[in-house]
Image (cartoon, helix red, strand yellow):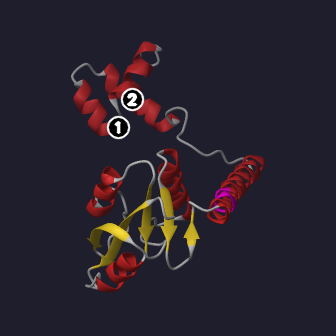
Amino acid sequence: MSNWRCVGNARVSTQEQTLALQQDALKKAGCERIFTDTVSGSDARWTTQERVGLSEALEFMRPGDTLVVWKLDPLGRSLKHLIETVTLLQERGIGFKSLTEQIDTTSSGGKLIFHVFRALAEFERDLIRERTNAGLQAARVRGRHGGRPRGLVEKKLKMLHALYADRSNSVADILATLNMPNSTLSRYVKADKCR
Protein backbone atom coordinates (compact mmCIF):
# COMPACT_ATOMS: atom_id res chain seq x y z
CA MET A 1 0.00 0.00 0.00
CA SER A 2 3.06 2.25 -0.04
CA ASN A 3 2.13 4.13 -3.24
CA TRP A 4 -1.49 4.63 -2.17
CA ARG A 5 -2.64 7.73 -0.29
CA CYS A 6 -4.68 6.72 2.77
CA VAL A 7 -7.91 8.54 3.55
CA GLY A 8 -9.75 7.52 6.72
CA ASN A 9 -13.42 7.51 7.62
CA ALA A 10 -14.43 7.14 11.26
CA ARG A 11 -17.99 6.82 12.47
CA VAL A 12 -19.59 6.56 15.90
CA SER A 13 -23.12 6.72 17.19
CA THR A 14 -23.99 9.46 19.63
CA GLN A 15 -24.06 6.87 22.42
CA GLU A 16 -20.36 6.09 21.99
CA GLN A 17 -19.50 9.80 21.84
CA THR A 18 -15.83 9.48 20.99
CA LEU A 19 -13.94 9.07 17.76
CA ALA A 20 -10.53 9.04 19.44
CA LEU A 21 -9.94 5.27 19.29
CA GLN A 22 -10.77 5.08 15.57
CA GLN A 23 -8.87 8.25 14.72
CA ASP A 24 -5.75 6.95 16.51
CA ALA A 25 -5.94 3.63 14.63
CA LEU A 26 -6.46 5.41 11.29
CA LYS A 27 -3.50 7.74 11.92
CA LYS A 28 -1.34 4.76 12.86
CA ALA A 29 -2.38 3.11 9.57
CA GLY A 30 -0.96 6.15 7.74
CA CYS A 31 -4.12 8.08 6.91
CA GLU A 32 -3.25 11.59 5.74
CA ARG A 33 -6.80 12.85 6.09
CA ILE A 34 -9.66 11.54 8.29
CA PHE A 35 -13.33 12.35 7.71
CA THR A 36 -15.73 11.66 10.57
CA ASP A 37 -19.43 10.97 11.10
CA THR A 38 -21.53 10.92 14.24
CA VAL A 39 -24.81 9.18 13.52
CA SER A 40 -27.64 8.53 15.93
CA GLY A 41 -27.60 4.91 17.08
CA SER A 42 -31.38 4.74 16.66
CA ASP A 43 -31.18 5.89 13.04
CA ALA A 44 -31.55 2.74 10.91
CA ARG A 45 -31.03 4.57 7.62
CA TRP A 46 -27.46 4.80 6.41
CA THR A 47 -27.24 6.82 3.27
CA THR A 48 -24.33 8.89 2.07
CA GLN A 49 -26.56 11.98 2.39
CA GLU A 50 -26.72 11.33 6.15
CA ARG A 51 -23.05 10.31 6.30
CA VAL A 52 -21.55 13.71 5.52
CA GLY A 53 -18.03 12.61 6.45
CA LEU A 54 -18.19 9.58 4.16
CA SER A 55 -19.58 11.73 1.34
CA GLU A 56 -16.77 14.25 1.81
CA ALA A 57 -14.18 11.46 1.85
CA LEU A 58 -15.57 10.01 -1.40
CA GLU A 59 -15.50 13.46 -3.03
CA PHE A 60 -11.94 14.08 -1.82
CA MET A 61 -10.52 10.77 -3.03
CA ARG A 62 -8.90 10.24 -6.42
CA PRO A 63 -7.83 7.10 -8.29
CA GLY A 64 -4.89 5.54 -6.47
CA ASP A 65 -6.19 6.45 -2.99
CA THR A 66 -7.36 3.96 -0.37
CA LEU A 67 -10.36 4.45 1.89
CA VAL A 68 -9.49 3.08 5.33
CA VAL A 69 -12.07 2.31 8.01
CA TRP A 70 -11.64 0.92 11.49
CA LYS A 71 -14.44 -1.68 11.07
CA LEU A 72 -16.67 -2.83 8.20
CA ASP A 73 -20.03 -2.33 9.92
CA PRO A 74 -20.05 1.48 9.89
CA LEU A 75 -19.53 1.48 6.12
CA GLY A 76 -22.74 -0.40 5.37
CA ARG A 77 -25.78 -1.75 7.19
CA SER A 78 -25.92 -4.87 5.03
CA LEU A 79 -23.56 -7.06 3.03
CA LYS A 80 -25.28 -5.86 -0.14
CA HIS A 81 -24.69 -2.19 0.72
CA LEU A 82 -21.08 -2.89 1.73
CA ILE A 83 -20.39 -4.70 -1.55
CA GLU A 84 -22.01 -1.87 -3.55
CA THR A 85 -19.83 0.70 -1.77
CA VAL A 86 -16.59 -1.26 -2.27
CA THR A 87 -17.51 -1.99 -5.91
CA LEU A 88 -18.08 1.74 -6.47
CA LEU A 89 -14.65 2.44 -4.99
CA GLN A 90 -13.03 -0.19 -7.23
CA GLU A 91 -14.74 1.27 -10.32
CA ARG A 92 -13.19 4.62 -9.43
CA GLY A 93 -9.75 3.05 -8.96
CA ILE A 94 -9.87 3.51 -5.19
CA GLY A 95 -8.74 0.81 -2.78
CA PHE A 96 -10.45 -0.16 0.44
CA LYS A 97 -9.05 -1.33 3.77
CA SER A 98 -10.72 -2.36 7.03
CA LEU A 99 -8.30 -2.45 9.95
CA THR A 100 -10.26 -4.70 12.32
CA GLU A 101 -11.21 -7.34 9.73
CA GLN A 102 -7.81 -7.01 8.00
CA ILE A 103 -9.34 -6.69 4.55
CA ASP A 104 -7.32 -4.82 1.94
CA THR A 105 -8.62 -4.71 -1.64
CA THR A 106 -5.30 -3.33 -2.85
CA SER A 107 -3.91 -6.83 -2.29
CA SER A 108 -4.83 -9.96 -4.22
CA GLY A 109 -6.07 -11.64 -1.00
CA GLY A 110 -8.39 -8.73 -0.24
CA LYS A 111 -9.78 -8.79 -3.77
CA LEU A 112 -10.44 -12.52 -3.40
CA ILE A 113 -12.36 -11.95 -0.15
CA PHE A 114 -14.63 -9.42 -1.83
CA HIS A 115 -15.22 -11.75 -4.79
CA VAL A 116 -16.34 -14.36 -2.26
CA PHE A 117 -18.56 -11.79 -0.49
CA ARG A 118 -20.09 -10.83 -3.83
CA ALA A 119 -20.75 -14.48 -4.70
CA LEU A 120 -22.36 -15.08 -1.29
CA ALA A 121 -24.60 -12.03 -1.67
CA GLU A 122 -25.68 -13.19 -5.13
CA PHE A 123 -26.32 -16.70 -3.77
CA GLU A 124 -28.48 -15.21 -0.99
CA ARG A 125 -30.48 -13.15 -3.53
CA ASP A 126 -31.05 -16.27 -5.65
CA LEU A 127 -32.25 -18.26 -2.61
CA ILE A 128 -34.67 -15.49 -1.64
CA ARG A 129 -35.98 -15.33 -5.22
CA GLU A 130 -36.42 -19.12 -5.34
CA ARG A 131 -38.25 -19.19 -1.99
CA THR A 132 -40.50 -16.32 -3.05
CA ASN A 133 -41.39 -18.02 -6.34
CA ALA A 134 -42.03 -21.33 -4.57
CA GLY A 135 -44.30 -19.57 -2.07
CA LEU A 136 -46.23 -17.82 -4.86
CA GLN A 137 -46.60 -21.11 -6.74
CA ALA A 138 -47.89 -22.87 -3.62
CA ALA A 139 -50.40 -20.04 -3.05
CA ARG A 140 -51.62 -20.26 -6.66
CA VAL A 141 -52.15 -24.01 -6.30
CA ARG A 142 -54.39 -23.22 -3.30
CA GLY A 143 -56.32 -20.66 -5.35
CA ARG A 144 -54.78 -17.53 -3.87
CA HIS A 145 -53.37 -14.87 -6.12
CA GLY A 146 -51.30 -11.96 -4.88
CA GLY A 147 -51.28 -8.37 -5.99
CA ARG A 148 -54.01 -5.81 -6.38
CA PRO A 149 -57.46 -7.01 -7.40
CA ARG A 150 -57.86 -6.81 -11.17
CA GLY A 151 -61.29 -5.24 -11.09
CA LEU A 152 -63.92 -3.89 -8.79
CA VAL A 153 -65.71 -6.37 -6.60
CA GLU A 154 -69.31 -6.89 -7.66
CA LYS A 155 -70.81 -4.99 -4.71
CA LYS A 156 -68.63 -1.94 -5.35
CA LEU A 157 -69.38 -2.13 -9.08
CA LYS A 158 -73.16 -2.04 -8.37
CA MET A 159 -72.65 1.00 -6.14
CA LEU A 160 -70.63 2.65 -8.90
CA HIS A 161 -73.46 1.99 -11.41
CA ALA A 162 -76.04 3.49 -9.06
CA LEU A 163 -73.99 6.55 -8.11
CA TYR A 164 -72.95 7.27 -11.69
CA ALA A 165 -76.50 6.85 -13.01
CA ASP A 166 -77.69 9.53 -10.57
CA ARG A 167 -76.49 12.69 -12.37
CA SER A 168 -76.79 14.73 -9.17
CA ASN A 169 -73.63 13.04 -7.87
CA SER A 170 -70.41 14.76 -8.81
CA VAL A 171 -67.38 12.74 -9.89
CA ALA A 172 -65.54 13.95 -6.78
CA ASP A 173 -68.38 12.69 -4.56
CA ILE A 174 -68.38 9.29 -6.28
CA LEU A 175 -64.60 8.99 -5.91
CA ALA A 176 -64.76 9.95 -2.22
CA THR A 177 -67.68 7.62 -1.49
CA LEU A 178 -66.10 4.62 -3.16
CA ASN A 179 -62.54 5.53 -2.14
CA MET A 180 -61.25 4.97 -5.64
CA PRO A 181 -58.87 6.85 -7.93
CA ASN A 182 -60.20 8.81 -10.88
CA SER A 183 -58.36 6.47 -13.26
CA THR A 184 -60.48 3.50 -12.12
CA LEU A 185 -63.73 5.44 -12.58
CA SER A 186 -62.58 6.62 -16.01
CA ARG A 187 -61.69 3.08 -17.04
CA TYR A 188 -65.18 1.81 -16.15
CA VAL A 189 -66.89 4.76 -17.80
CA LYS A 190 -64.85 4.34 -21.00
CA ALA A 191 -65.62 0.63 -21.02
CA ASP A 192 -69.29 1.66 -20.86
CA LYS A 193 -69.75 -0.32 -17.67
CA CYS A 194 -71.60 2.43 -15.82
CA ARG A 195 -74.27 3.27 -18.38
Magenta-colored segment: predominant secondary structure:
helix
Q: Is residue 119 visible?
A: yes
Residue linked to disc 2: 160
Q: Residue at x 33, y 61 (%)?
A: 54
Mark 1 Cα shell of 10 Å, populated few (<14), some (14-19), many (≥20): some
Depth check: give the residue in front, 28 or 73.
28
The reply, left or right, for residue 10 in relation to residue 150 is left
Residue 41: horizontal and vertical position, in percent?
A: 33, 77
* Viewer-side residue, 184 vs 97: 97
Quadrant hosting residue 103: bottom right
Which region shows up in magenta? 114-118
User: Residue type at mark 2?
Assistant: Leu
Label 2 or label 1, whichever comes before in sequence order: 2
Residue 95: percent from the left, percent from the top? 50, 57
Q: Secondary structure at mark 2?
A: helix
Using the image, determine if residue 140 lies above or below residue 150. below
Q: Residue at x 35, y 77 (%)?
A: 27
Q: Per the image, is 178 magenta?
A: no
The image shows residue 161, relative to residue 191, as above or below, that is below
Residue 72: % across, % down:
49, 71
Query: In this orientation, does residue 41 appear?
Result: no
Q: Which residue is tagged 1?
A: 178
Please state which amino acid type lies under the numbered disc 1: Leu
Residue, x 46% and y 59% (percent of image)? 4
State the quadrant of the C terminus.
top left
Side (left or right) of 183 relative to 14: right
Q: Is residue 115 magenta?
A: yes
- Circles 2 and 1: CB atoms closer than 8 Å: yes
Packing grade of label 2 (10 A; few <14, some 14-19, many >=20) is many
In the image, taking residue 65 as reference, residue 149 lies left or right, namely: right
Q: Position of residue 99 (x, y in %)?
A: 49, 76
Please identify the quarter of the rendering in which residue 24 is found. Answer: bottom left
